[in-house]
Structure formats: structure tokens, C-alpha cells
Amino acid sequence: MTEHGEAAYAVLRHVRPLHLQAARAVTEALRDEPLTMAIRALLERLLDRGPQTVPQIAAWLDVSRQAVQRVVDDARLLGYVEVRANPTHRRSHLVDVTSTGRDAFRRLHAGEITTLTEVAAGIDRDELLVCADVLERLADAIAGRRGASGRMAP
């Protein structure tokens, strides 16, 4: 292995435990909420990218359309999302966040930011921004490589 590859691996070996710990923290924070982690992720995606179809959301999450449809249906029952006609595709409707969903996400996210401010107090803000950039570029590179060869396993 090269030193560059070893350095990339050193980053990746921390991603999974970090993700699992963060998921547990979010799940705990949602304990008394009607929201699930999946609905929270759906709301965040729609607020970041605007209205999308179920297939678009499924492709981003790398899960089945059926799994996303179940989350959308649950979020609709809670009044967090609405489904409307798609002017570019008759059968694939657009999913969008309602004001109730927007308010719920913003309230939860504000609590997350407060917690993360405390958790990351000892880490320089610029280092966090560099880390986020590196992780985004690494994720994009791995996604592109996986599509090309089908054999990435970090």
C-alpha cells in the first residue's frame, strides 16, 4: 500500500464508528418525537435540495424506492411532507416539505447544533471545515470508483 492510500484508510476507519455514534445520539434525541431518523433524513434532503421524486431520493440514499415510499407515507401522515404533481413526469410525483415539517426539522436541528457546539468545542472551526470537505471529496471518489469497478470495500 502507498502512504497516500494508508492516509485515506486512516480517515475511513473512523467514519463508521462516528456514523454509528451520531446515529445513536440522533435516535436518542428523537425518542420523544413522532419523527424517526429516516423521516429526519428525508426532511433534511428535501430542505437542502428542494422537491424531489421518490426515485431521486432513493438513488441518493442508495436504498430501494419502496423503502423511501414507506418513509414518505409515514411523513405524510405526520403532516411533514406533501406530494404533488410533477410537471416533468406524470407518474413520478414530487415530494416536498410542509411548513410543519420545516418547523419540526429546524427545531430538532437547532438542538443538534447546540449539542455539536459543545461536543466540538476543542476543535478549530477551520479544521472542521477542511474535514467536511475532505470527507465529501472522498465519498464522491469512492462512489465514482464503485460505479466503475463494483469492488470498493472500505
Image (cartoon, rainbow, N blue to C red):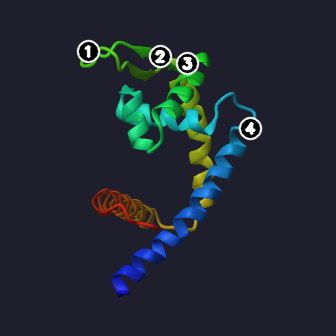
Q: CA distance from mark 1 to mark 2?
A: 15 Å
Q: Quadrant of residue 135?
A: bottom left
Query: As drawn, is 129 to the left or to the right of 73?
Result: left
The tag earlier along the polypeptide, 1 or 4, is 4
Mark 1, residue position: 87
Task: Answer whether labels 2 and 4 touch (C-beta < 8 Å).
Answer: no
Q: Pointer 4: residues within 10 angstroms few (<14), some, or many (20+)?
A: few
SS at circle 3: helix
The tag earlier along the polypeptide, 1 or 3, is 3
In the depicted view, which residue is nearer to us: 14 or 130? Answer: 14
- Give the numbered dot on residue 76: 3
- Looking at the rendered structure, the kind of residue marked 1 is Pro
SS at circle 4: loop
Mark 2, residue position: 82
Residue 128 x %, y %: 45, 63
Say above or below: 144 vs 104: below
SS at circle 2: strand
